[in-house]
Amino acid sequence: MPPVKLFQFRHSPFCEKARLLLSAKAVPYAVQEVTPGVGQVDLFRRSGQRQVPVLQDGDVLAVGSVAIARHLDSKVPEPPLLPVDPQARARALLWENWADTTLAHGARMALLQAVSQDNHLRKALLPQATPTPLRDLLGALPGEMVSGVSQLLTRAGFQQLGHALEQLTTLVANGQPLLDAQHCVADVAVAAQLYGLKFPTAAGAELAGRGVPGIADHPLFEPLFAWRDRIYGAMGRGDLTPAPSSDPDNPASTPGDHG
């Protein structure tokens, strides 16, 4: 078993960011899905944290995707995730911060709203260990029963997210990395937060191509998701298989995540 272990929730964008970072560095790793309750207690004992992602590398614990990126850069210098040039490095860190905060918030609210209205999406995002009767019950809930969730993102909020994605689409229309000619943490951070807006093939057959209506199916954003998929390919995450799991019978629920 690889000495590196990632504690995660499979469909967390921040955990996806960690998986992209690990793939970019070609670091073998095992995955431990964190379940609410007992799983979070165990994680807290190990790291002092109840949120994911957490990377365990021998005696070293890196908590959060930002710390994981820095740890991996020190562990495996090539290829660098952060530019060496101070100004380029500063720009990369600004991009990462924007993706981990502003973009992450808008994308999370949009996905929650979509889940409240799409029974298939709701069922597909449930942990694999969810009993079939409960899965069917949750999937069959009418949208009005979760109307509170559906109002999390206002019309203005959705328009603001759409405007940001339009500008981002323009920036990546040439298919190139966000900074210079080499992919860095800026590309990884942005690509990871696009995860739930339109699920990539790495999310599995049930989710691939699905996402937030008005974004996932809008032709305006096709170049953006094509760019995202190229990032996945460059990072070694462009296949149809989900992240490896050290405990396939113990998939996660939603214990919460952070950058």
Image (cartoon, rainbow, N blue to C red):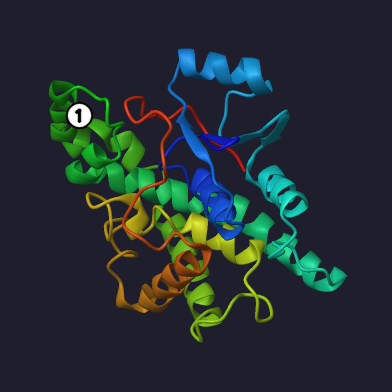
Left or right of 81? Residue 224 is: left
**Which of the 4 quarters of the picture holds residue 81?**
bottom right
Left or right of 65? Residue 242 is: left
Relative height, residue 44 to residue 57 (above, below): above
- In the rendering, at what x and y percent does residue 193 appear? 50, 55
Viewport quadrant of the C terminus? top right
Q: Residue at x 66, y 58 (%)?
A: 96
Q: Residues within 10 Å of mark 1 (few under 14, many from 20)?
A: some
Identify which amino acid the numbered label 1 is placed on. Leu
Q: Which residue is mark 1?
A: 138
Residue positioned most to the right: 86
Residue 242 in sight from this viewpoint = yes
- In the rendering, at what x and y percent does residue 170 appear? 51, 81
Relative height, residue 46 to residue 32 (above, below): above
Q: Residue at x 53, y 73 (%)?
A: 168
**Which of the 4 quarters of the picture holds residue 252?**
top left
Residue positioned most to the bottom: 174
Q: Residue at x 45, y 68 (%)?
A: 233
Residue 199 in sight from this viewpoint = no
**Which of the 4 quarters of the picture holds residue 55?**
top right
